[in-house]
Image (tube, grey):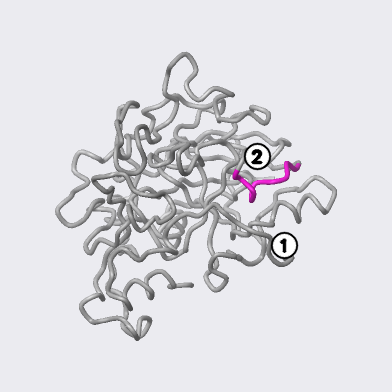
Amino acid sequence: MAKTWRKYMLAVATASLIAAAIVGFLNRPSPAVLFSTSADPVSRSAETKPPGMAWIPDGEFWMGSDEPGFTDARPWHRVRLNGFWIDKTEVTNEQFARFVQATGYITVAERKPDAKDFPNAPPENLAAGSVVFTPPNHPVGLDNHYHWWSYAKGADWRHPEGPSSTMRGREKHPVVHVAYDDALAYAKWSGKRLPTEAEFEYAERGGLDRKRFAWGDEYRPGGKFMANTFQGHFPDQNTGEDGYTNTAPVGSFPANGYGLFDMSGNVWEWTSDWYRPDYYKAIAAAGSVAVNPKGPATGFDPSEPGAPKKVQRGGSFLCTDQYCARYIAGGRGKGDPDTGTNHLGFRCVLDSKQ
């Protein structure tokens, strides 16, 4: 597992150097994709409704986006999926707390980095922590995300903004500061798995065909906010017009056509797919409908060739059309598997018996 962002940050003893932790969206062509066909699904009968989950029926849909700037989400291509169950909401703090209480699990952010993994790091920097949005108090250029992200010692799922913060009163909020392995561990404990990227987008669209948003073509139909996103001047002033300047309790905004909440906005969500910016081109070049795609066999991020990323979906409360509009349906994110942030969570899925 790549530890590039941590190694860099620890080695230079600068808390703000977290480049591999930030979700990027400017990509360029890369080598050919090798497709993965393996899967390890959890089976569950579609006749029995699992608590807190919604059934997504078998179907075909157009996957992708023609949004300007979404170069890695092109071209549109047809995908066919088997039906599956999906959590109606992101996994919450109280749900994750039950998992931790039952298993004694310690998240990546709570573990002290091993000096063997970071041989160039000063000892004082080998402290548990995670990546936190830290807005400046004045306007800054948007070409350097170090202006608004920092590595906070003591930040973890129990302390979302650092050691002086708490999740008390946020039990119904999505759990954050979860690395990919943390999400996998929870999914295994609950008898579920993480969604593929295709499953996430199919569920996010809620039965709509190539609409810009999960709810239609208008950002605020009738003047109503439909998702927890960023309003104001990014990154220094979030006016919170939608009612929130941070995470919101799950289900605070309207459900989509499949009865799912926060598939856009609130927090980014892990998927099981490796990220490659050219993956959709490879699928489209095959010239047929992609059936239950599970992503490329390996990840490749041209901005960091030695640090493979996992796909993240849905955008977050920090997404804005001024910088990152990935709450738009089809938008793709990426992240180091060992990196959590205070705007990243997850939800789970279940397969039915075939």
Residue 329: x percent and y percent?
Answer: 57, 36
Is residue 51 in sight in this rendering?
Answer: no
Q: Nearer the viewer, residue 26 or 23?
A: 26
Is residue 54 in sight in this rendering?
Answer: yes
What's the residue at 40%, 60% (across, down)? 179
The residue segment tinted magenta is: 69-77
Question: Is residue 199 rendered to the left or right of residue 3?
Answer: right
What's the residue at 28%, 54% (across, down)? 157
Q: Nearer the viewer, residue 211 or 92?
A: 211
What residue is disc 1 on? 35
The answer to whether residue 146 is magenta is no
What's the residue at 56%, 48% (across, down)? 332
Callout 1 amino acid: Phe
Residue 20: x percent and y percent?
Answer: 44, 64
Q: Residue 250: which disc?
A: none
Q: Quick one: quadrant of the C terminus?
A: top right
Pair 2/1: label in front: 2
**Residue 328, quarter of the rendered image:** top right
Q: Crowding at label 2, few (<14), some or many (≥20) Cα neighbours within 10 Å? A: many
Callout 2 amino acid: Ser
- Dot 1 falls on a residue whose secondary structure is loop
Residue 61: x percent and y percent?
Answer: 71, 36
What's the residue at 26%, 68% (across, down)? 128
- Dot 2 falls on a residue whose secondary structure is loop
Q: Nearer the viewer, residue 50 or 135?
A: 135
- Label 2 to label 1: alpha-carbon separation: 21 Å
Q: Crowding at label 1, few (<14), some or many (≥20) Cα neighbours within 10 Å? A: some
What residue is disc 2 on? 65
